Amino acid sequence: MDIEKVNSMDFGEFVDVFGNVIERCPLIAAAVWSQRPFSDLEDLEKHFYAFIDALPPSGQEGILRCHPDLAGRELQQGTLTAESQREQSGAGLTSLGADERLRLEELNAQYRARFGFPFVLAARLSHRAAVPRELARRLHCSPAQELRIALGEVKKIARLRLADLLGVDPSRL
Ligand SMILES: NC(=O)N[C@H]1NC(=O)NC1=O
C-alpha cells in the first residue's frame, strides 16, 4: 500500500485498517486521520507517536492498560486481537510449558502491582526465554522511567504493525 492509497482513505476505512496499530486504541487512528495528507510512511508513523507523546500520563497509562498480558489469560481464552496473537505466537509465548507460564504470570502480577499497568514489550523483537528476564529487570525501574520504557515498546509494536500493513521493511520506516 502506498501513501497515496492511505491519503485517499475515508474515515471509516482508515480506522478499519489502522485502528489496532496501537493495541485496542482505535481513537488514536481516528485522531491521526484528521492530520492527513501524510507526506510519506514515516510521517504517518510520526503522527501516531505524536498523539501518544501529547497525552497526559493518565492517558499514556490508559494506552498501556489496553494491552493484554504476555502469555496471560486472554491468550489462554483465545480472546487476543489477531495482531497480538501473531506477535505472542511468533515469540513462542503460545507454547510455554506450565512452569514457564506460571513464572511469567507471577512476574506479570508483581509488575502490575508495582506500576499499576501491564508489562508491555514488543514480543516480535524478543523470545520466550528473554521475556521473563526483561520483565524481572524492568521491575527495578522507577515508575517514571518505566512509563517511558513501556511507551517506547508501544511505539516499536506500532512500527512493526504499520510496516506489515504497508508491506514495507520496518527498517525503512
Ligand atoms: N503486554 C504486551 O506487551 N502485549 C503486547 N506486546 C506485543 O508485542 N503484542 C502485544 O499485545
Image (tube, rainbow, N blue to C red):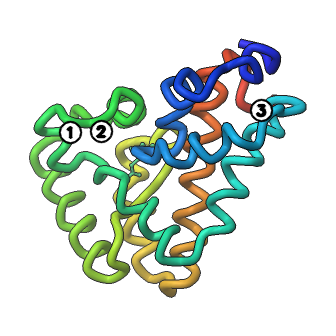
Mark 1 C-beta to ligand 1 under 8 Å: no
Residue 11 vertical placement versus 27 (above, below) = above
Residue farthest right in this picture: 39
- Whichever of labels 3 and 1 marks the residue nearer the N terminus, that label is 1
Q: In which quarter of the image is residue 112?
A: bottom left
The quadrant in which residue 88 appears is: top left
Identify the disc placed on residue 171.
Answer: 3
Disc 1 to disc 2, C-alpha distance: 9 Å
State left or right for residue 124 relative to residue 70: right
What's the CA distance linking mark 3 and mark 1? 29 Å
Q: Do the residues labelled 1 and 2 touch (CB within 8 Å)?
A: yes
Q: Name the residue under label 2.
A: 93
Which residue is found at the position 60% from the left and 21% from the top? 165
Amino acid beneath label 2:
Leu
Q: Where is residue 97 in the image (x, y as percent from the top left)?
A: 15, 41
Residue beneath label 1, please? 75
Q: Is residue 60 above or below residue 30?
A: below
Q: Where does the image place residue 79, in percent across and percent down from the top left?
A: 19, 35
For the C terminus, which image quadrant?
A: top right
Instruction: Tell which of 5 and 123 is nearer to you.
Output: 5
Depth check: give the residue in front, 13 or 119: 13
SS under mark 2: helix
Which of disc 3 and disc 2 is earlier in sequence? 2
Q: What residue type is labelled 3?
A: Ser
In the drawing, does residue 60 fall left or right of residue 90?
A: right
Q: Which callout, 2 or 3, points to the residue nearer the camera?
A: 3
**Quarter holding the N terminus?**
top right
Quick check: marks 3 and 1 in contact, CB under 8 Å? no
Give the SS element for disc 1: helix
In the depicted structure, whether residue 78 falls above or below residue 106: above
Query: Tag 3: Cα neighbours inside 10 Å, few (<14), some, or many (≥20)?
Result: few
